[in-house]
Structures are given as C-alpha cells and as structure tokens.
Image (spheres, rainbow, N blue to C red):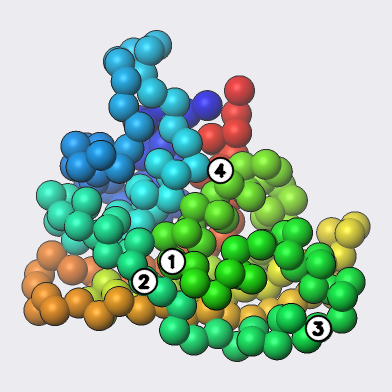
C-alpha cells in the first residue's frame, strides 16, 4: 500500500504535473480533510482508493493548490447531464450483466464525476492488468473553467481479453458551472487516460 508521497508522485507522473505542485495539492487536500492522516514515516497513513480519487480530482482541476478542497467539493457535485448509453437497460441480458459487473456505477444515473473516479480506482486496484485491457483507449477530458467533463469508455466484454471483441463504446458527460472568471491559474483542460488510473491503482494494490 502506498503512502501519500508515493501516491502524489505517481499521480504527478501519469498526469504530467510537476511533483512539487502535486505535493502542494496533496498538502491542502489533507488539511481540508480529504486525505487520510495518521503519523509519519513507517506509521504514515496508507492511501485508499478514495484518497486517490480526491488527488486525481485535484490533478484534473489544476488550479492553485490552496483551492484543492474547494475543487474536490465541486467535482463531487458534478452530476451526469448527458449520456449516449441511455439504452443500457434495454441491451441483451448477457451484455448488460457483463457491463454491470465491470463498471456498476454507470447504472446509477445519479452518480457524480467524483463517484466515477472513486469507482474506477477501486475497480482498477482489484486487477490493474485486467482494467488496463478492458479500458484501453478510454479517457476523461476535463475543462476546468466550466467544470465540465466528457468521459469516453471503450469497455471490452470479451472474457479472454485477447482482443477487443464484444466491446461497448459510449460516453458520459458531467457538468457543474463555475461562477469564477478565467485566471492565469487555470490550465483550461486536462486529459486523464484510464491507463494512468491503472498505474495509480497498481501502486495502491501493491503489498
């Protein structure tokens, strides 16, 4: 299991954010109560999928570090406002059940972007290699200014995972409008590949 330093370094690696910047996000997120806390050194808190989801939320929004708690809270409120998978429940039972096993959160139409991040990290931590294969070419495109995200899924339903057969491709969009004006602190958009989530989860799953 990873400590906060190891987790922030891995998230910095997969997102391209400077490690020192990511460490500042982690510091303010922890001070805001969004990261597990305990002692230092060998007694330092072990990071959980929820901790990883909160730090990934910081990495997506990528504003000044002091605002990390506010960004996490805002991403927690980003509801689904569009999906091209509204026919999920009408799909053949075998494919529907496979999708429900792989990514159950998509069947809850009230979930938020933060809940999706948390669910993805939890699923990936169980088997990062399987997750990497199933979600090849999937990503989250996030625009900070308007707090909008478009998540592209390419889920492999093949039990062998050797090729992308019986795949389902669809997308979810999330939104929470911001009243804040554009500033120099914003990087207008961020791309998070699901392979990066697999690497973060692999770290969490390591003994």
Cα distance in 3D space between marks 1 and 3: 24 Å
Pointer 3 residue: 91
> Quick check: marks 1 and 3 in contact, CB under 8 Å?
no
User: What secondary structure is found at the residue carrying circle 1?
Assistant: helix
Considering the numbered disc 4 on the image, is that residue within a helix, a strand or a loop? helix
Give the spatial CA distance, label 2 vs label 4: 23 Å
Residue 201 bears which disc, if any? Answer: 4
Residue at x 44%, y 84% (from the top left corner): 81
Sequence-wise, the earlier of marks 2 and 1 is 2
Q: Where does the C terminus fall, quadrant-wise? A: top right
Q: Nearer the viewer, mark 2 or mark 4?
A: 2
The reply, left or right, for residue 93 in relation to residue 195 is right
Determine whether the residue tagged by mark 2 lies in a helix, strand or loop: loop
Identified at 30% across, 42% down, the residue is: 34
Which of disc 3 and disc 1 is earlier in sequence?
A: 3
- Decide which of tag 4 and tag 1 comes sooner along the chain: 1
- 4 or 111: nearer the viewer: 111
Identify residue for label 2. Answer: 78
Report the residue at 36% width, 71% height from top.
Answer: 78
Decide which of 89, 65 is in the foreground and name it. Answer: 89
Q: Which mark is residue 113?
A: 1
Query: Is label 2 in contact with label 1 (beta carbons under 8 Å)?
Result: yes
Q: Is residue 206 above or below residue 125?
A: above
Report, in whole angstroms, how far the alpha carbon at label 4 lies from the one at label 3.
30 Å
Which of the two residues, 97 or 121, is positioned nearer the viewer here? 97
Mark closest to the chain's N terminus, 2 or 4: 2
Instruction: From the viewer's perspective, tell me whether residue 131 is left or right of residue 120.
Output: right
Q: How far is the residue under mark 4 from the one under mark 1?
A: 18 Å
Question: Which is nearer the N-term, disc 3 or disc 2?
Answer: 2
For marks 2 and 1, give the CA distance: 6 Å
**Mark 4 vs 1: CB contact within 8 A:** no
Q: Which mark is residue 186?
A: none
């Amino acid at each position: 299991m990873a400590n906060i330093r190891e987790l922030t370094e891995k998230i910095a690696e997969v997102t391209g954010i400077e490690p020192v910047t990511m460490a500042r996000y982690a510091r303010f997120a922890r001070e805001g109560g969004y990261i597990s806390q305990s002692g230092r050194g060998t007694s330092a808190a072990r990071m959980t999928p929820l901790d990883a989801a909160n730090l990934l939320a910081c990495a997506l929004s990528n504003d000044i570090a002091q605002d990390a708690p506010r960004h996490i809270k805002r991403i927690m409120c980003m509801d689904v406002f569009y999906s091209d998978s509204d026919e999920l429940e009408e799909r053949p039972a075998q494919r529907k059940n496979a999708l429900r096993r792989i990514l159950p959160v998509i069947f809850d139409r009230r979930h938020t972007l933060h809940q999706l991040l948390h669910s993805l990290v939890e699923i990936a931590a169980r088997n990062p290699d399987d997750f990497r294969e199933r979600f090849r070419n999937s990503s989250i495109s996030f625009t900070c200014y308007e707090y909008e995200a478009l998540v592209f899924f390419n889920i492999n339903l093949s039990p062998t995972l050797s090729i992308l057969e019986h795949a389902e491709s669809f997308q979810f969009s999330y939104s929470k409008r911001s009243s804040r004006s554009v500033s120099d602190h914003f990087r207008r958009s961020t791309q998070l590949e699901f392979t990066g989530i697999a690497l973060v989860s692999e770290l969490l799953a390591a003994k």
